[in-house]
Image (spheres, helix red, strand yellow):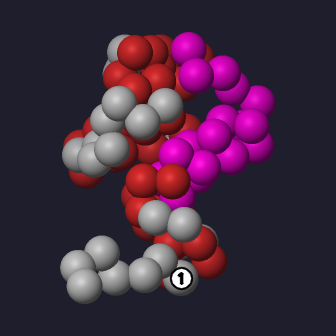
Amino acid sequence: MDTYETVKNRVLFLCEEKGITINKLATKSGISPSTIKNILYGKSNNPGIVTLKMLCDGLEITLGEFFSTKEFDELEQEIK
């Protein structure tokens, strides 16, 4: 799995875990629903760290909690 897929899956997992929709996450994080959908559906393959921080704020977690998963730990190096 690549970094993009891992980020996408993590956002979807956290929304499901917290019982919130993409639209509710958008409201809570101050990001437009279209921006989140672009991240989730591949139109934005490289969300910035500020955007991820805002998503984390909406999910009421830290950036550290967002990235603290086995999937992120096991990502292969992007530069080969």
Residue at left offset 45%, top offset 44%: 56
**Residue 62: percent from the left, percent from the top?**
45, 56
Kindly give the residue lying farthest to the front in the view shown: 80
Residue at left offset 49%, top offset 31%: 41
Picture layout, residue 2 above or below residue 78: above
Residue 16 forms part of the magenta stretch: yes
Residue at left offset 56%, top offset 14%: 23
Q: Quadrant of residue 25?
A: top right
Q: Quadrant of residue 31?
A: top left
Q: Quadrant of residue 12?
A: top right
Residue 36 seen in this snapshot: no
Q: Quadrant of the N terminus?
A: bottom right
Answer left or right for 78 relative to 12: left
Circle 1 residue:
74
**Residue 52: percent from the left, percent from the top?**
35, 45
Q: Main secondary structure of the magenta part?
A: helix
Q: Quadrant of the C terminus?
A: bottom left
Instruction: Count residues near mark 1 (Cα–Cα under 10 Å), then give few for <14, some for 14-19, many for 20+.
Output: few
**Residue 43: percent from the left, percent from the top?**
35, 30
Tell me the magenta residue range.
6-23
Picture layout, residue 77 above or below residue 20: below
Picture layout, residue 55 above or below residue 72: above
Picture layout, residue 73 above or below residue 23: below
Q: Secondary structure at mark 1?
A: loop
Residue 32 forms part of the magenta stretch: no
Answer left or right for 16 relative to 35: right
Residue 5 seen in this snapshot: yes
Pick the residue in front: 50 or 74: 74
Disc 1 residue type? Answer: Glu
